[in-house]
Image (cartoon, rainbow, N blue to C red):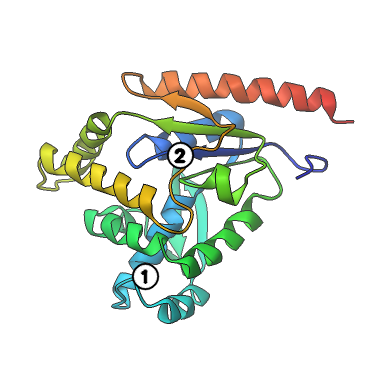
């Protein structure tokens, strides 16, 4: 993919559930002035619409029809990235444990992945974007300018998710949340289509024990360095 004529770099951030991808990507996008495309939220959006339609995620023909009627947009409001599906703000609705569980099944369906892959590439092709997910650097944009693989221990990711859920009033235990995160890892790594994989040329970033600001600063420095190299090399 040529960088000529693009408005900025294409940055891919992959990693398992609970690694802090969404929060870190939002902060990094703000620092760089880039557009944040949350691909995980896109799969969650499809899962939400499928649930409302009474689909279990295994009927490809019904899922294909469902996808044809879905429009997904992102916009920022008071510093927060909002997810809009068919004109409805579903930012909170797609973050429940039930939708999280269904999302893993939905994201394994090739018909859904193909639909969202086309949409993601169209959104990102002009550059100046950061995309986060589980297969951005391996499938969606294998030629991304910068690739990060963001991780943390399963215990740390479970703890973060538990704090997030309890802050919202969810009645869940830390042990159950850690187990759910471990199960999600197994599902995402073992699925047939575009499983969670680290790109060979990705930069590893382990956020265990680091603050969000520390991780963002580390990643921003690497991106700025790449931007400088690109500006020198681009006529």
Residue 151 point in image, percent of width and height? 39, 31
Front residue of 162 and 62:
62
Q: Is residue 58 above or below residue 180?
A: below
* Quadrant of residue 36 within the rendered picture: top right
Q: Which mark is residue 176?
A: none
Residue 136 point in image, percent of width and height? 54, 46
Instruction: Name the residue: 48% across, 26% down.
Output: 204
- In the image, which is nearer the foreground, mark 2 or mark 1? 1
**Does residue 128 show up?**
yes
Residue 182 point in image, percent of width and height? 24, 42
| Label 1 neighbour load within 10 Å: few <14, some 14-19, many 20+ | many
Q: Which residue is mark 1?
A: 49
Front residue of 46 and 74:
46
Instruction: Name the residue: 52% across, 32% down.
Output: 148
Instruction: Name the residue: 22% across, 31% down.
Output: 155
Instruction: Name the residue: 48% across, 51% down.
Output: 39
Front residue of 78 and 10:
10
How much space separates mark 2 and mark 1, taking CA atoms? 26 Å
* Quadrant of residue 5 within the rendered picture: top right
**Does residue 89 show up?**
no
* Quadrant of residue 105 within the rendered picture: bottom left
Residue 91 point in image, percent of width and height? 37, 54
Q: Which residue is mark 2?
A: 79
Q: Quadrant of the C terminus?
A: top right
Front residue of 198 and 157:
198
Query: In the picture provided, is 63 more to the left or to the right than 54?
Result: right
Q: Secondary structure at mark 1?
A: helix
Nearer-N-terminus badge (2/1): 1
């Amino acid at each position: 993919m040529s960088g000529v004529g693009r408005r900025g770099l294409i940055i891919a951030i992959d990693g398992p559930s609970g690694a802090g991808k969404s929060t870190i990507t939002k902060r990094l996008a703000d620092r760089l002035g880039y557009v944040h495309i949350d691909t995980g939220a896109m799969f969650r959006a499809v899962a939400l619409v499928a649930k409302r339609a009474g689909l279990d995620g295994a009927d490809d023909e019904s899922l294909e029809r469902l996808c044809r009627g879905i429009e997904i947009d992102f916009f920022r409001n008071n510093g927060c990235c909002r997810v809009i599906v068919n004109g409805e703000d579903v930012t909170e609705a797609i973050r429940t444990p039930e939708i999280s569980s269904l999302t893993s099944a939905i994201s394994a369906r090739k018909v859904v992945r193909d639909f969202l892959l086309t949409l993601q590439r169209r959104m990102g092709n002009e550059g100046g974007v950061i995309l986060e997910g589980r297969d951005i650097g391996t499938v969606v944009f294998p030629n991304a300018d910068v690739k990060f693989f963001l991780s943390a221990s399963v215990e740390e990711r479970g703890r973060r998710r538990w704090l997030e859920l309890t802050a919202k009033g969810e009645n869940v235990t830390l042990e159950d949340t850690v187990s759910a995160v471990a199960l999600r890892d197994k599902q995402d790594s073992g699925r047939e289509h575009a499983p969670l994989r680290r790109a060979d040329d990705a930069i590893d970033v382990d956020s265990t024990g680091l603050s969000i600001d520390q991780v963002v600063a580390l990643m921003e420095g690497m991106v700025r360095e790449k931007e400088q190299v690109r500006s020198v090399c681009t006529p």
